[in-house]
Each structure stands twice: as C-alpha cells, then as structure tokens.
Amino acid sequence: MNRNRSSTSAGEDTVSPWIETIAAKYGWIWIGLTFGLAAKYALLIKRGVKVRPILVFADFLLLPMVALIAYSIAHQFGATGEAAALLTAMGTVGADRLVQFYMDRFFAQIERAGNTSPGPDGPGD
C-alpha cells in the first residue's frame, strides 16, 4: 500500500508561481502605496483636518490610478526595490495633485489635437 506522495513534506507550504511573480514585480509598489497613504493621513491629521470615512473612501478609489501612475514613473526611471517604493510613496502622498496633473496634460493633448488645421487635402477645402 504505497500511496503516491507529493514532493513536499507535510509541514512545508508552497507558494504559487503566479503569486511569487506578482509579489516580486509589484511588492515594492504596494509597500510604497501603503506607506504613502499612511503618511498622507498623518500629514492631514497634523494639519488639523478631520479625517472622515468619505475621505478615506475617496482615496481608496483613487489608489489604483495612483498605483498605475507610480508604476509607470518607476519604470521610466528604471527604479526598482526601495527606490520604486519611495517614488510610489511620494506619489501617494500627493495623489490629488498627481492625478490632477495627468488629467490636465491629457486634456491639453486632446485640445491640441482638436485645434490642428486641416492640410491642403483635408476636409476643409
């Protein structure tokens, strides 16, 4: 009665390769988001702002967008590890201003694209 045994022993836990890859690639980003969010609320409390649940809820809704922006910035600078976490934390502390900056840039590009005059063969002739 020799049953098939797995390659791991009874006390050994295994981690999925997917989870391991996600943790290796985005772990520092999550650490930066967590520390940045804590620092943001610490600064608000220090300024005397009353932190309400709606404010926390709004920040959690903004967090995925901040994560994408922070990952993009870290990737463009080639930052990994602690540097990526630091860039992400700084982006999270100034999340409102960072998202507003990117929205302004986006709408300015749309406006410039809409204001271009058609060429000689364009529909305006």
Image (spheres, rainbow, N blue to C red):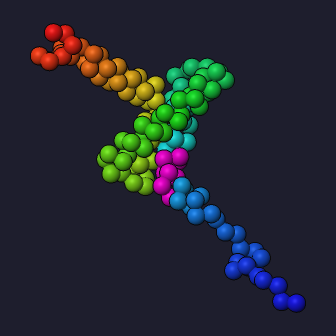
Residue 121: quadrant of the picture: top left
Q: Find residue 24 and report its horizontal and vertical position in percent.
A: 50, 58
Residue at screen point 36% across, 48% down: 75
Residue 106: quadrant of the picture: top left
Residue at screen point 27% across, 16% down: 114
Which image quadrant: the N terminus? Answer: bottom right
Q: In this rendering, does residue 116 appear at all?
A: yes
Residue at screen point 53% across, 34% down: 63
What span is in magenta?
24-31
Q: Eyeballing the image, is 124 above or below 21?
A: above
Q: Find residue 11 and report its horizontal and vertical position in percent.
A: 75, 74
The single residue placed furthest to the right in the displayed view is: 1
Left or right: where 53 falls relative to 104? right
Q: Find residue 19 and report its horizontal and vertical position in percent.
A: 59, 58
- Camera-side residue: 47 or 58? 58
All told, the count of numbered labels is 0
Left or right: where 27 falls relative to 16? left
Q: Find residue 91 and report its horizontal and vertical position in percent.
A: 43, 36
The single residue placed furthest to the top in the displayed view is: 125
Left or right: where 123 falls relative to 63? left
Q: In this rendering, does residue 101 appear at all?
A: no
The single residue placed furthest to the bottom in the displayed view is: 1
Q: Eyeballing the image, is 3 above or below 63?
A: below
Residue 46 belongs to the span the image colors magenta: no
Residue 29 belongs to the span the image colors magenta: yes
- Camera-side residue: 59 or 45? 59
Left or right: where 3 falls relative to 36? right
Residue at screen point 55% across, 42% down: 34
User: Which secondary structure is most common in the magenta stretch?
Assistant: helix
Residue 53: quadrant of the picture: top right
Q: Eyeballing the image, is 109 above or below 25?
A: above
Which image quadrant: the C terminus? Answer: top left
